[in-house]
């Protein structure tokens, strides 16, 4: 997986071949196929690892906060610009690959997103309990909508400047989402 991540960081693309990964990792095709039956499985495992690790960090940061503050922090973390050109390439490549996963492997992609969905649901429940968010929210459904909205708006950071002259930042996304759930 490390070699695939390195290639992705260099190119920002997921159209590399299994042979490129094998050569980069100095392993054999046989070793690759002992772990993954296809390149899609490799990329799915990579996305799953990244999403699980990120969600674990975000949960640790948001757990002590109120629902409102936790939601703001989570949206800020997800919306934050990449810290390096390598990270930007990885983010860009995986964003487009996520679209492919959604269409070609929706059940597997749902499994990848499940930890983040649980975190958003927990934040909504916390906000309901502390009286910040509406009590009539359908938490599981609204968590899915909110999660997908926030993930989708990552693309709007640069596109927003071209559409309306202003980049769309985490604060814009937070205020938009809050209007739907605020009490």
Image: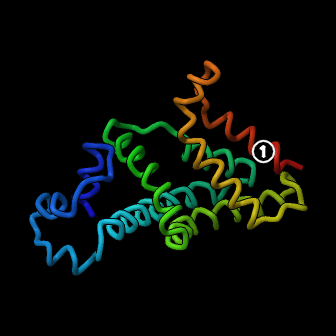
Location of residue 143 by image quarter: bottom right
Q: Can you say whether 23 is above or below 79 in the image?
A: below
Q: Can you say whether 157 is above or below 60 in the image?
A: above
**Residue most extreme to the top:** 165
x and y percent of residue 97 in the render? 42, 54
**Residue most extreme to the bottom:** 34
Q: In this view, does 22 lie to the left or right of 58?
A: left
| Residue at image mark 1 | 178
Q: Is mark 1 on a helix, strand or loop?
A: helix
Figure coloring: rainbow
x and y percent of residue 158 in the render? 52, 29
Work out whether residue 13 or residue 118 is closer to the camera in this orientation and state it.
Answer: 13
Q: Is residue 156 left or right of residue 87?
A: right
Q: Which residue is drawn at 29% across and 46% down?
A: 9
Q: Can you say whether 165 is above or below 73 in the image?
A: above
Work out whether residue 33 or residue 115 is closer to the camera in this orientation and state it.
Answer: 33
Few, some or many residues within 10 Å of mark 1 (<14, 14–19, 20+)? some
Work out whether residue 41 or residue 124 is closer to the camera in this orientation and state it.
Answer: 41
Task: Please state the total of marks drawn on the protein image.
Answer: 1
Location of residue 67 by image quarter: bottom right
Q: Which residue is drawn at 42% across and 39% down?
A: 82
x and y percent of residue 73 in the render? 62, 46
Q: Which residue is drawn at 44% across and 66% down?
A: 48
x and y percent of residue 78 in the render? 55, 47
Q: In this view, does 156 lie to the left or right of 180?
A: left
Task: Give the quadrant of the N terminus.
Answer: bottom left
Q: In this view, does 128 lie to the left or right of 104?
A: right
């Amino acid at each position: 997986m490390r070699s695939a991540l390195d290639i992705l960081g260099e190119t920002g693309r997921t159209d590399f071949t299994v042979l490129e990964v094998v050569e980069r990792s100095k392993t054999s095709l046989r070793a690759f196929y002992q772990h993954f039956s296809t390149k899609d499985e490799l990329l799915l495992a990579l996305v799953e690892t990244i999403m699980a690790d990120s969600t674990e960090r975000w949960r640790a940061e948001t757990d002590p906060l109120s629902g409102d503050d936790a939601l703001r922090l989570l949206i800020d973390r997800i919306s934050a610009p990449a810290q390096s050109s390598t990270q930007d390439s990885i983010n860009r490549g995986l964003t487009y690959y996520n679209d492919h996963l959604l269409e070609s492997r929706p059940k597997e992609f749902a499994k990848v997103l499940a930890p983040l969905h649980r975190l958003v649901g927990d934040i909504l429940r916390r906000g309901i309990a502390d009286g910040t968010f509406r009590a009539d929210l359908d938490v599981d459904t609204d968590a899915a909508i909110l999660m997908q909205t926030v993930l989708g708006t990552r693309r709007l950071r640069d596109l927003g400047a071209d559409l309306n002259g202003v980049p769309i930042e985490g604060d814009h996304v937070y205020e938009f989402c809050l209007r739907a759930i605020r009490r």
